[in-house]
Amino acid sequence: MAKYKLRIKKSAAKELEAISRKSDRKRIVSRIQGLADNPRPDGCKKLSGLERYRIRQGPYRVVYSIEDEQLVVYVVKIGDRKSVYRAP
């Protein structure tokens, strides 16, 4: 299987930096890097209504889209499970 490129939206990068615990940030970054090898890992869920997926890392969620034609995973949002699915 070919390796996917990772793209992270600027706002998602800011959301990652805003997470207070360094250990949580490291685990989230590790999960995101794993998406390059397998964009649909065990435990990922397809979100209804949009062509987006989410993975869990503790109380946090990473919302992303997959472009299989260009082999790109685009991270859209990172946040606490309570607020990550709400529209801005």
Image (cartoon, helix red, strand yellow):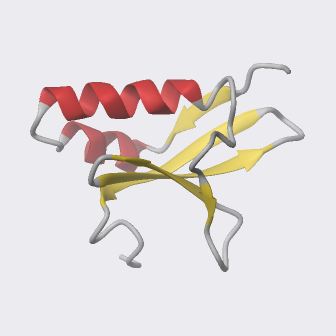
List the single residue furthest toward the top. 2
- Judge left or right: residue 80 versus residue 33: left
Q: Quadrant of residue 69?
A: top right
- Where 42 sits versus 26, above or below? below
Q: How many marks?
A: 0
Residue nearest the observer in this picture, 54 or 64: 54
Query: In which quadrant will I find the N terminus?
Result: top right
Looking at the picture, how far across and down is residue 43, in whole percent?
A: 57, 49
- Where 83 sits versus 9, above or below? below
- Judge left or right: residue 87 versus residue 41: left
Query: In which quadrant will I find the C terminus?
Result: bottom left
Looking at the picture, how far across and down is residue 8, in whole percent?
A: 50, 38
- Judge left or right: residue 9 versus residue 45: left
Q: Quadrant of residue 48?
A: bottom right
Residue at horizontal 11%, vertical 35%? 21
List the single residue furthest toward the right. 69
- Judge left or right: residue 70 versus residue 22: right
- Where 30 sits versus 48, above or below? above
List the single residue furthest toward the front. 42
Looking at the picture, how far across and down is residue 36, in whole percent?
A: 64, 26
Looking at the picture, how far across and down is residue 2, in whole percent?
A: 83, 20
Residue at horizontal 75%, vertical 20%? 3
Residue at horizontal 78%, vertical 45%? 67
List the single residue furthest toward the left. 20
Residue at horizontal 71%, vertical 65%? 51
